[in-house]
Image (cartoon, helix red, strand yellow):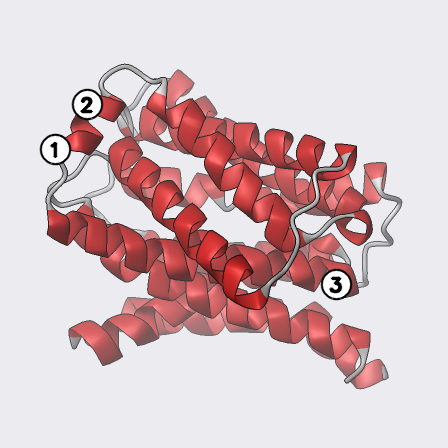
Amino acid sequence: MEPQTKGFLFATIGALSAALFFVPYKIALQSTEPLVFVLAMYLAGFVIGFIGSVLKREPISFDKKTLGGAIIFAILSVVGNFAIGQSMLGIDPAITVVLTRVQVIFVMYMGWFFLKERLAPLLVPGAIIALGGFVWMNYSEDISFDGEFVFYLWAIGSAFCFGASQVIMKAIIHDISPITVNHLRLLIGAGLLALMPGVLESLKALEFEVWLLATASAFFGPTISRLCHMYSIRYIPVSQATLFILLTPVFTMLVSYLVLNIFPTTQQLIGSTIIMLGIFLPLGRLVWRR
C-alpha cells in the first residue's frame, strides 16, 4: 500500500472513530459536567492503552522528544477543552462547535509557514466549502448571536490549541512512538484536569454507568481516533489529514441513524454532501493525478 493511501485510510478511520466517540459522550453529558467526564475518559483511555501495550509487549521509551511532545500535547488538549467549556458558557454551543472547526484553516497555514508544507491546489477552497457544509449542518433559526465577544474568542482559542498540537505532532512524528506519546499525554492531561477546582471531587461521585460511557468514549476517541490521526500524518501532510476531521459530522449522522435510529434531516443530508464535495475537491484531484 502506498504511503498516501495509508494516510488517507488512517485519517478516514480516525474520523469514523471520532463519530463513534460522540455517541456515549453526548449521552454522558446529559448528567455529567464536561471536564469531569473528560477526566474520566482520559483515565479510562490511559488504562486501555496500558493494557494494550502490555498485551503487545511494546516497550515504553521516555526520550526528550517523546516526553516533550506528550507534555505540550496534553497542555494544549486541556486548554482547548477548557476553552470550549468557557465558550459554551456565553454563546450557543452550535456556534462553539462550528468555530472550533476553524482549526482546519489554522493547520493549513501553520503547516505551510512552520513546516514548509506545500498547500495542494484547491486545498484551501475545498476546506472553506467543507466548513460551509459544516455550518449548514449546525445552523438553526433558534441560534442566538447575542453573546459577548470574549466567548467567541474562547472558541477560536480552542481551535488554535487543537490546530497547534497537530502541527507540533507532525514536526516530531517520525521521531516518536505515537502510542507512547498518547499514553503520556492522557496521564498528564488527567493530572492537569484533576487540579481544577471541584473536578476531582465530582469524579469520585460518578456512577458506574458513566464510567462505562467514559470507557467507550475513551476507546473510540482518545485511543483509536487520536492514534489513527497521528499515524495518518506520518504519511500525508498535516493539512490534508486535518481536512478529514470534517468528515466526523457525516459519520456521526450515519452512526446516529444506525445506532440511535435518528433519521438525518434534509439539512444534514445537504450539509454532508457539501462537506464531501469540499473534501473530494482537493484530495480527489491528488488521487486522480497519481
Of pointers 3 and 1, the one earlier in the residue sequence = 3
169 vs 79, left or right, is: right
Q: Which residue is mark 1?
A: 205
Report the front residue among 212 and 280.
212
Q: Is residue 91 visible?
A: yes
Q: Nearer the viewer, mark 2 or mark 3?
A: 2
Comparing 206 with 79, the one in front is 206
52 lies above or below 105: below
Say what amino acid the circle numbered 1 marks: Ala
> Which quarter of the figure is the N terminus placed in?
bottom right
CA gap between label 2 and label 1 equals 7 Å
Image coords of residue 16 (percent x, y): 45, 69
The amino acid sitting under disc 3 is Leu
Q: Secondary structure at mark 2?
A: helix
Q: Residue at x 79, y 43 (%)?
A: 171
- Label 3 sits on residue: 122
Looking at numbered disc 2 in the image, what kind of residue is underneath it? Answer: Glu
